[in-house]
Image (cartoon, rainbow, N blue to C red):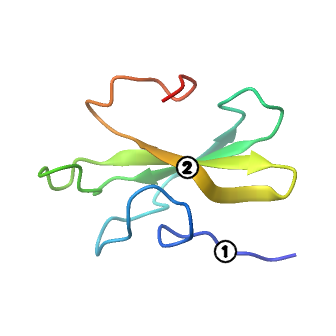
Amino acid sequence: MKYRLTQASSGVATCATKDDRFGCSLSAGDTDADGYPDLAVGVPDEKVGSKTNAGGVHVLRGGTSGLTGTNSRLVHPGHGRRLGQPG
């Protein structure tokens, strides 16, 4: 089975914009302790609020059907939380 997730996929936090560099780096792990691997996707040039190139990490959730954009979130400088924390 092949499928493709992008920053424009349904449910992915924030919208795709030019030159975000979504997917520049990747890391997998179970960040929410549900037994399924999640994918952290680096977005080094993500705009956050009015700050251009603030950067961040999109966390895509894994589940019984694989990875999905549903309930993903963007963690960025100033977010105030680590990946495993709710929010």
Residue 62: x percent and y percent? 74, 48
Residue neighbourhood size for the residue with mark 1, other residues' Cα within 10 Å, grouped as few (<14), some (14–19), many (≥20): few
Q: What residue type is labelled 1?
A: Arg
Considering the image in quadrants, where does the N terminus appear? bottom right
- Residue at which label 1 appears: 4
Residue 58: x percent and y percent? 48, 49
Residue at the left extreme, as displayed: 50
What residue appears at the point 51 percent right and 60 percent down from the top-left corner?
12
> For the residue labelled by badge 1, is the local secondary structure a helix, a strand or a loop?
loop
Q: Earlier in the sequence, mark 1 or mark 2?
A: 1
What residue appears at the point 23 percent right and 49 percent down from the top-left corner?
48
What residue appears at the point 22 percent right and 47 percent down from the top-left corner?
54
Image marks 1 and 2: residues in contact by CB distance under 8 Å: no
Between circles 1 and 2, the one closer to the viewer is 2
**Image check: 20 left or right of 10?**
left
**Image check: 74 left or right of 59?**
left
Residue neighbourhood size for the residue with mark 2, other residues' Cα within 10 Å, grouped as few (<14), some (14–19), many (≥20): many
- Asked whether 68 or 25 is in front, the reply is 68
**Image check: 54 left or right of 70?**
left
- Asked whether 34 or 77 is in front, the reply is 34
The image shows residue 3, relative to residue 62, as above or below, that is below
**Image check: 12 left or right of 35?**
left
> For the residue labelled by badge 2, is the local secondary structure a helix, a strand or a loop?
strand
What residue appears at the point 48 percent right and 30 percent down from the top-left corner?
87
Residue 53: x percent and y percent? 20, 54
- Asked whether 47 or 10 is in front, the reply is 10
Disc assigned to residue 78: none
The image shows residue 36, relative to residue 67, as above or below, that is above
- Residue at which label 2 appears: 72
Q: What residue type is labelled 2?
A: Ser
- Cα separation, mark 1 vs mark 2, equals 15 Å
Residue 86: x percent and y percent? 54, 26
